[in-house]
Image: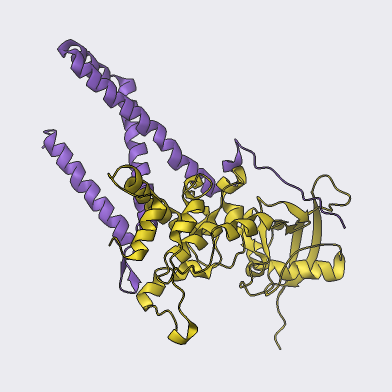
Amino acid sequence: MTQLKQIRVQLEVLRYNPDTDTEAHFQHYDLTCPEEWVVLDALNKVKADIDPTLNFRWSCHMAVCGSCGMMINGEPKLSCHSFVRDYEGTVIRVEPLAHFPIERDLVTAPDDFMEKLKRVKPYIIRKDKKPISEGEYKQTPAQLMKFRQYSMCINCMLCYAACPEYGLTPDFIGPAALTMAHRYNQDSRDCGRAERQEVVATHEGVWECTFVGACSEVCPAHVDPASALQQMKITSSIDWIVEHLIPGGKSAGDTVSREKAGDIK
Amino acid sequence: MSRNPLVRPVPPTSWFFRHPRYLRYMSREITCIFIGAYCVLLVVGLQRLAAGPVAWESFLLGLRSADSIVFHILALAAAVYHAATWFNATHKAMPVQIGEDFVPPNVISGAHYVVWVVLSVAVLFLAGVF
């Protein structure tokens, strides 16, 4: 078996102990590991061989679970998706995801995101539920493609760490949760857009977004949250025009309900 | 173990130095100042025109000054950059789906550039440049 090439890896990891610290500080770790390793492997080696007190989250090690998001040299990345060889000869600075409270070391508190995700009702809402005996709700491939990319979100929160609007205005619902709203709004089986508009079409919703576009640049699942938000701005604007500028125009919620009921085409 | 989460605030006036992509964003946004200033200049021009021939000639003389020419060059550069950044992003806001496929982004952006050129030529034609 071929021996893997070993390289020197220098990690500078942000440490914070909530029981003893008032500020976070960097701790340096020096190790040698195969160049095929990712930053998460290096952290695991540190925890196993050098410093068992180091805390970080991870699970799948294959960029699917979204647990190991960290700031690596200032960039939000999945640590299982960041090869140490790409940083050879430099110090790799590892910090917890930006814009989230640090629970301990590299572990952040995702409570705010989870709460916001719930608020956008990220599930199919039906007006008329049919019994299972009547079969599934069918969908054409074209209808699926309308929202498919948005369904690839793994809730890793890298987009929140990249979004300066979320960092500056923590009330912002944020990229991933709003993208989830769009994903279900675009789903031909869903009837819940009017309900989601109460969260989406607000100052905390899409109108807080100034289209920096960083969310889409850092997404490891190649979702394009910036596109979802801009599209929702357009539909929300049309709602506003219908409600305020067209004589007899109903509110967004009414309009959507009437559309779904077949009153207006 | 107790919960005592540490919040690291974002510096409100210097956050955009943290990453080149934020500087690119700010450069796009700052172009608005020139575009806004040019709009003000147009409104002033209209006001001068309404004030009579003497006021209008004085306004035109002011436009020929070196400062005015520098401002116009900067405003034009800002407007071109501003327009290009938005045209390049149009496919995100207005994706076009045909069947199962989406029209490629460069086609949507390209269509905007074509319309831009056509309208610019039309405006120049109406202004008597050709």
Q: Is residue A190 above or below residue B28?
A: below
Quarter holding the C terminus of chain A is bottom left
Q: Which chain is purple?
A: B
Which residue is depicted at the point 32% across and 63% down? B96
Q: Position of residue A59 (x, y in %)?
A: 70, 73
On screen, residue A155 versus residue A241, left or right, reads right
Q: Nearer the viewer, residue B14 or A177?
A: A177
Q: Is residue A122 visible?
A: yes
Quarter holding the N terminus of chain A is bottom right
Which residue is depicted at the point 42% across and 72% down? A189
Q: Position of residue A47 (x, y in %)?
A: 82, 67
Q: How is the image coloured?
A: by chain
Which residue is depicted at the point 46% across and 50% down? A201
Q: Nearer the viewer, residue B127 or A34?
A: B127
According to the rendering, which colour does chain A have?
A: yellow
On screen, residue A116 versus residue A129, left or right, reads right
Q: Position of residue A138 (x, y in %)?
A: 40, 80
Q: Is residue B89 visible?
A: no
